[in-house]
Amino acid sequence: MHARVERFVEPSLLLLLRERPLHGYELLERIPELGVEGRVDIGNLYRLLRALEEEGLVQSEWSADLPGPAKRTYELTAEGRRLLDRWAEALNRAQGTITGFLERYEASLAMPVSGGTGSARGSVGTDRSKRSEE
């Protein structure tokens, strides 16, 4: 159970389920609200939900009281809430790192371009043109 940002669908599901129990199609519809880019495949979503259930992070039960056919409704467990807390801590740290990087990047745009790098590239190009003339 590692909080890795490249697996952002996982904490998104945990957060949605912390808000209230949901069934798979509701989760699929609500994931984009959290900024998850691209379409999540329904098959992958259910595989992830099963994996989260096997790890004890979510639990599910069949609900026949909803309109239409019976649906499996998922809810967050205490262990799932603890993992979501760790995700939030990791994302806060990452946000600080990203903010620092972007602030430094923006500051570097106002600085004059260093001549050392440009002249090295220029000499490489000059060397190549001299070789082609020989």
Image (cartoon, helix red, strand yellow):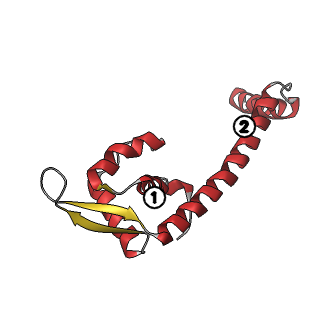
Residue occupying image coordinates x 27% and y 57%: 43
Q: Which mark is residue 102?
A: 2
Q: Could you tell me if residue 37 is visible in this image? A: no
Residue occupying image coordinates x 72% and y 41%: 99
- The amino acid beneath tag 1 is Leu
Secondary structure category for the residue under label 1: helix
Disc 1 vs disc 2: which is toward the camera?
1
Q: Which mark is residue 14?
A: 1
Seen from the viewer's position, the closer of residues 89 and 117 is 89
Q: CA distance from mark 1 to mark 2?
A: 28 Å
User: Looking at the image, is 52 positioned above or below residue 104?
Assistant: below
Q: Whole-percent x and y of residue 121?
A: 77, 33
Q: Whole-percent x and y of residue 96?
A: 72, 47
- Dividing the picture into quadrants, the one containing residue 70 is bottom left
**Left or right, residue 15 beside residue 4:** left
Q: Quadrant of the C terminus?
A: top right
Q: Could you tell me if residue 114 is visible in this image? A: yes
- The amino acid beneath tag 2 is Leu
